[in-house]
Amino acid sequence: MIHPRDISDKRIGISVLNWGLGHVTRSIPIIESLCQQNNELFIFCDDHQKQIFSQYLRDVNFVNHRGYPFKFNGKGRFKIDLLLTSRKLYQYLKSEKQLAHTYVEKYKLDMLISDQRYGFMSNVPSIFITHQLQFPVRGIYKLGNLIHRQQISKFSSIWIMDNEHERYAGKLSENKNYDKSIYIGCHSRFQLIQKPTEKEVNGILVFNGPEVYSQILLDTFTPQIINGEIEKIVGPESVRSLLVRKNIKTPFFASTDMSSIDALFINTSKIFGFFGYTTLMDCLELGCDYNLIPTPGQDEQIYLAKRHKKSL
């Protein structure tokens, strides 16, 4: 089974899921390593993703590629939100497969790498990156696991983003059904950044989930902001107005300026936010404490929060 470190002298297309920034940032060290191994990388992404990628990566090619049409109503009915948009998602999946074939021919690609995008595959070796080989769902929603298994089994290989023997994703990354898979370890953009020995910031609050849930995150951690445990706040520009309405004066850093944000992360003792898997991997790489809550309705994050009890 091919490992990222074994790939060299190839023309590679990669596309990551447009679900927040976690899929973008966790793929950065993989892309950087592939570039160092004399591969030519073509990143298929939307403008927002490009804005982040371009702050870390040089000598890569960007191709505009729109994201999946996700829509969340902010009421914590995550699975229902997905069901309501399932038709549009499936239609886009089919169109993405056609686009992937076109990209392979147009850019003479030897390989495709997809981070959680079911449609980004073609007749060249196509690799699927995930930390979830199964979802923590019950009842009728187990149908989602069957669909998931069916879709990722179509790929040439599966890269499981977790450690094989110390699985931070727990049962989500347990390999029960996939022979053509390999564990590639945890990945964080902070692998590429030198970290100080002393931490200067007590804590930062990062708005790392769907923006419709920003108010919930702010309300949850307002006490820590007031008592000074949270000294800095990071998030999209939309968060700024929430802070103004609550008369919060804590310094705010927009999540478009990654160099400033990274300087905060590597210097903080504790991170507050939603329990995204990428955020967990970042905390592990940084060696910092964390207080993370699950995004309402997201079974994966509820499971991770229970597994890593420091967040409860």
Image: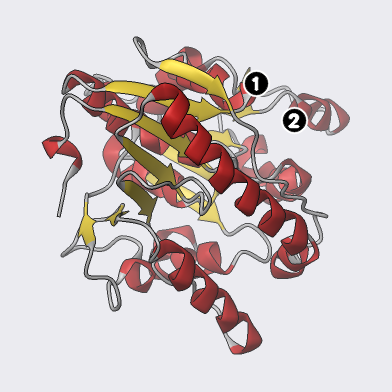
Q: Nearer the viewer, residue 202 or 18?
A: 18
Label 1 to label 2, Cα distance in Å?
A: 9 Å
The reply to whether residue 60 is visible in this rendering is yes
Q: Residue furthest right?
A: 245
Instruction: For mark 2, give the secondary structure.
Output: helix
Measured as percent of width and height from the top left, residue 248 is found at 76, 28
Measured as percent of width and height from the top left, residue 229 is found at 53, 37
Mark closer to the observer (1, 2):
2
Quarter of the image containing the N terminus?
bottom left
Q: Establish if 56 lies above or below 209.
A: above
Measured as percent of width and height from the top left, residue 286 is found at 30, 35
| Amino acid identity at mark 2 | Val
Mark 1 lies on residue: 252
Q: Residue furthest top?
A: 59
Q: Nearer the viewer, residue 40 or 75?
A: 40
Q: Residue at x 68, y 45 (%)?
A: 210
Q: Residue at x 61, y 52 (%)?
A: 93
**217 sits to left or right of 133:** right
| Amino acid identity at mark 1 | Phe
Q: Earlier in the sequence, mark 1 or mark 2?
A: 2
Instruction: For mark 1, give the secondary structure.
Output: strand
Mark on residue 239? Answer: 2
